[in-house]
Image (cartoon, helix red, strand yellow):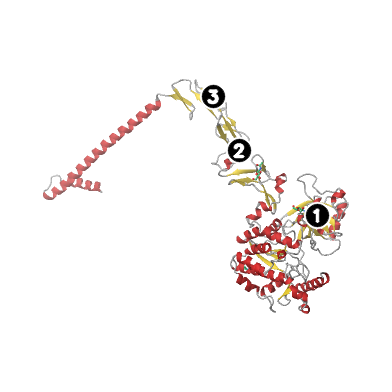
Amino acid sequence: MRGPAWRALLVVLALALADAAAGRFVVEKNSIQVTSPDELKGKYECAIGNFGVPQYGGTLHGWVEYPRTNRKGCQSFDQFDISFKPKKAGGRPNFVLLDRGECFFTIKAWNAQNAGAAAVLVVDDKSEPLITMDNPEEGKEHLENITIPSVLITKKLGDQLKKSAEAGDMLSVLLDWRESLPHPDERVEYEFWTNSNDECGPKCDMQMDFVKNFRGTAQVLEKKGYTQFTPHYITWYCPEAFVTSKQCKSQCINHGRYCAPDPEQDFSQGYDGKDVVVQNLHQICVFKIANETGKPWLWWDYVHDFALRCPMKDKKYTHDCASDVIKSLGLDVEKVNKCVGDPDADEENEILKAEQDAQIGHGKRGDVTILPTLVINNRQYRGKLDKVAVLKAICSGFEETSEPAICLSEDIQTNECLDNNGGCWLDKANNVTACKDTFRGRVCECPIVKGVKFVGDGYTHCEASGIGRCEISNGGCWQETRDGKTISACSNEVSEGCKCPAGFKGDGVKSCEDIDECQEKRFCQCKGCSCKNTWGSYECSCGDEKMLYMREHDTCISKEGTTATVGWSFLWVIFFGLVFAGVGAYAVYKYRLRSYMDSEIRAIMAQYMPLDNQEGANQQHHVAHADDI
Ligand SMILES: *[C@@H]1O[C@H](CO)[C@@H](O)[C@H](O)[C@H]1NC(C)=O
Ligand SMILES: *[C@@H]1O[C@H](CO)[C@@H](O)[C@H](O)[C@H]1NC(C)=O
Ligand SMILES: *[C@@H]1O[C@H](CO)[C@@H](O)[C@H](O)[C@H]1NC(C)=O
């Protein structure tokens, strides 16, 4: 008894949703810029497909090919011997232009990818506003293997491109996702609209895989304050007239207010829609309580552990199992239960009411109708729910240059450096490159290696600079070893450049040549001298045993002679100088002392008797006092 009952209810629920949301689905776009031919040059809009990997934050430049046959891309291009691989390695990639219709968008993308295309441009077959290409509900095992981006372009632009291609023009376009997400500040807010149901086929598997793979990254970003994440759950309501129907009773809680479809789409067996709503509510409450304790990231652990420990297939999708998981994460079960409330009560549940309100879009933000949906900085993410693709999208939501390190890590590399080193500077011998793979595409930037900064334009040259630069491939300078002696043109004392050391000449980079001091500098030309050039220096001998070569003055002097005599006489001068100074000082002292005492005595005696030579005595007295001062 599967068919009619659930179909009827799905229609009812869909109507209810459409009614509640006033149906406004926003088509997320990126820009497509035609760079040739000239008459089509300009910027156009295209809609990002909801599969594959759009290069959020980046660009992709390629040639456009319109296949001569299999133009809808519904068959493998192999059978027609068509390949879109670049003609030579490192060549600009090829995009393929395909017509809409006949098969799923994902089939077209899959066939194009297998034929080597780097992106798919699907041309709408109707003149209408752009729509979002979604993936089919039913499982297609290749879905998760689509890694190229897909976009839908308008019929108008498509017809022009096709015409141009058929006329034999070279078509070249730039796909640009840099403005697909707003990137206003240093924190990215994102939401994941999901579902606790683990039995809904590929979409549920995809959602669980995403939680499993992305959990670690999400937690790092959240703990460091780079992101603010909130989980969300879609619920529908049962129209008034059906509240007491069997269907609504099994799918809804709080008297038809919050509903979810039956997991197996069969009311008579397994879990019901209302069990899903209750588990969804648990998950929101876990987030709320975890957030209150300052650890919002515990939601990822809860959802992951719950799916693992309490799957529907083991009949463990229950309140008790949920409580065990909550407990093991150290969260307060009572608080969570209080938040969940009574599912049978005929009243609003604040939490679920808020979720229903949040489903409805506003401003540039569309309604959330596809499950799962990721909303990043208030825009819906389109593309594969894949760890790297999503991280790329989140990274493109940071204000430029404020991206956390994780955005520039190897995880997210585009491998553009593998091809021809991305056109950047490369020092093959030392395995140092300026090519840096980032989520925004490759950049040519002189690197920092072992703490040593390279400077330069990054394309044609980079050069080690500053302290320690000589440790790295000798700072790019010349260096040579002969007879165990190493001479280098790099010096850590200067911060850049190479200079041949004394005794050498040259540019210091490619070579330094020994200077022949004997010939070129005409050193050691004194009478009887003999000169011998050595590597980096020279030797000079004076011929006469008694002579000594003075390198500074390039001259020979007598070994015994001048220097010794000069030395001794100098000492004698100092010695006699000191003696004379000492004697002189003593004499002066003696004389002074005596004349002082004389004058004092005279002064005292003068008080008792008149002296015959008073004037002279007074003069002496005056002088002595003046000397005292
Ligand atoms: C998709 O990729 C997986 C893992 O790389 C592989 O096992 C699987 O066979 C692929 N599916 C298809 C349809 O190519
Ligand atoms: C989580 O907590 C933060 C700060 O405590 C708060 O700003 C934010 O609104 C909370 N989020 C939810 C969904 O409650
Ligand atoms: C060069 O360095 C990279 C990473 O630093 C390493 O993966 C690669 O194997 C190195 N290649 C050679 C030839 O040493």
Kind of residue at badge 1: Trp
Mark closer to the observer (2, 3): 2
Cβ atoms at labels 1 and 2 below 8 Å apart? no
Q: In this image, 492 relative to 12: left or right?
A: left
Query: Label 2 belongs to which residue?
Result: 477
Image coordinates of residue 242 in percent, x first then y, are: 78, 78
Point out which mark residue 532 bears. 3
Kind of residue at badge 2: Cys
Q: Quadrant of ligand 2?
A: bottom right
Mark 1–mark 3 Cα distance, whole angstroms, equals: 78 Å
Tag 3 or tag 1, which sits nearer the N-term? 1
Q: Is mark 2 within 8 Å of ligand 3?
A: no
Kind of residue at badge 3: Lys
**SS of the residue under disc 3:** strand
Point out which mark residue 110 bears. 1
Number of other residues with Cα within 10 Å of mark 1, as a class: few under 14, some 14 to 19, many 20 or more: many
Residue 486, placed above or below residue 145:
above
Q: Quadrant of residue 226?
A: bottom right
Mark 2–mark 3 Cα distance, whole angstroms, equals: 28 Å
Tag 3 or tag 2, which sits nearer the N-term? 2
Residue 452, placed above or below residue 555:
below
Mark closer to the observer (1, 3): 1
Cβ atoms at labels 1 and 3 below 8 Å apart? no
Point out which mark residue 96 bears. none
Tag 2 or tag 1, which sits nearer the N-term? 1
Q: In this image, 529 relative to 475: left or right?
A: left
